[in-house]
Amino acid sequence: MIRWLHKPLALLAALALLLFFLWALAALYFDAGAWFPLALLALAAGAVIVLRSARGTALVVLVGCATVLAWWYTLSPDNNREWRPEVARLPGAQIDGNKITVTNVRNFSYREDEEFDVNWETRSLDLDQLVGVDLFLNFWGPEHIAHTIASWRFADGSHIAVSIETRKESHEEYSATKGFFRQFEIYYVVADERDLIKVRTDHRGEDVYLYRMGFPLEDAKALLLDYMREINRLNQQPRWYNALTHNCTTAIRYHSKHIGAAGPLDWRLFANGHLPELGYERGVLDQSLPLEQLVEASYISDRAKALPADANFSNAIRQGLPGFSR
């Protein structure tokens, strides 16, 4: 029996080591430079030639990969780089009880995706006037993957949106592959909805959906406060973005967990194009329509493109959507 078990376990160990080796090669390639993976390949090849032992070679490769992992964890994020103008300023929050003053709120006016008028604002928020939190879901390509944006509604008709993104340097473009490595700092874009939504609908041609979240009001307040505290922490201690473990959706779950409102871990948090299905199952989304009709009715790209970028934009895109007041 032991001999029978030995082979499957050995195969699993070999597969795990192979995956570790491939990760180490990729980490060296993206985070150190194109030539550095050759050193790890040379180490593995040398072990095969010199040791001529599967176990010995595996041990050398394991040590080499572990060394790469230890080095990788020494890479530090930094707030002091030459940033692209749309992420040049870090937002900050001054919290005084239920009053929040947010600095560096982005409200750019876009002529094209990368052609815009720069405008940074200071906004005053009153948690006593908070009436709810909503979720934008926008698709730029893959149907199983989306970008999420949380937005809080206030009784006076104002909104504040937060999009968790990569903070790109002036020479960088986003890469989904590089997002798995230590290439981008995480950045909380605190912005007017006109900025975040119209650039996506009007200039990037993305499909945007808007859902009213059925969070209790106290949870919506606590969630916003937790976002603001994290924004302040990032001013002092930047952290890396990771496309798998710390992205626009998993970060929302972390914040929800901090306030005791996170549900069980689910695969749809990673394949986040399926979040409406998950939210519907958990009763977080409006239940007045079947899920398929809810998704169809929540599509706002066409109306957002047709609307002017004026002060009524946020209220206008919500008119007639499921769960919102008519």
Image (spheres, rainbow, N blue to C red):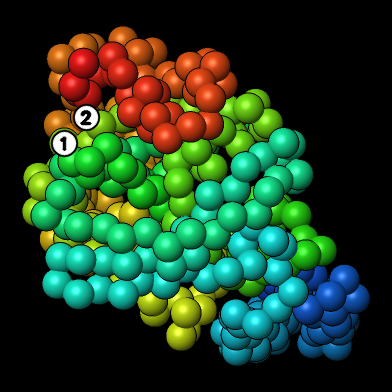
The x, y position of residue 223, in whole percent, is: 23, 58
Q: Residues within 10 Å of mark 1 (few under 14, many from 20)?
A: some
Residue behind mark 2? 285
| Residue in view at x 28 percent, y 46 percent | 152
The x, y position of residue 180, in whole percent, is: 61, 61
Tag on residue 312? none
Q: Is residue 137 above or below residue 56?
A: above
Amino acid at the residue labelled 2: Leu
| Residue in view at x 61 percent, y 62 percent | 87
The x, y position of residue 316, in whole percent, is: 37, 23
Q: Is residue 299 visible?
A: yes
Q: CA distance from mark 1 to mark 2?
A: 6 Å
Q: Is residue 122 above or below residue 197?
A: below
Question: Is tag 1's residue or tag 2's residue first in the polypeptide sequence?
Answer: 1
Q: Is residue 71 above or below residue 278?
A: below
- Disc 1, disc 2: CB below 8 Å? yes
Amino acid at the residue labelled 1: Gly
Residue behind mark 1? 214
Q: Quadrant of the N terminus?
A: bottom left
Q: Quadrant of the C terminus?
A: top left
Q: Is residue 189 visible?
A: no
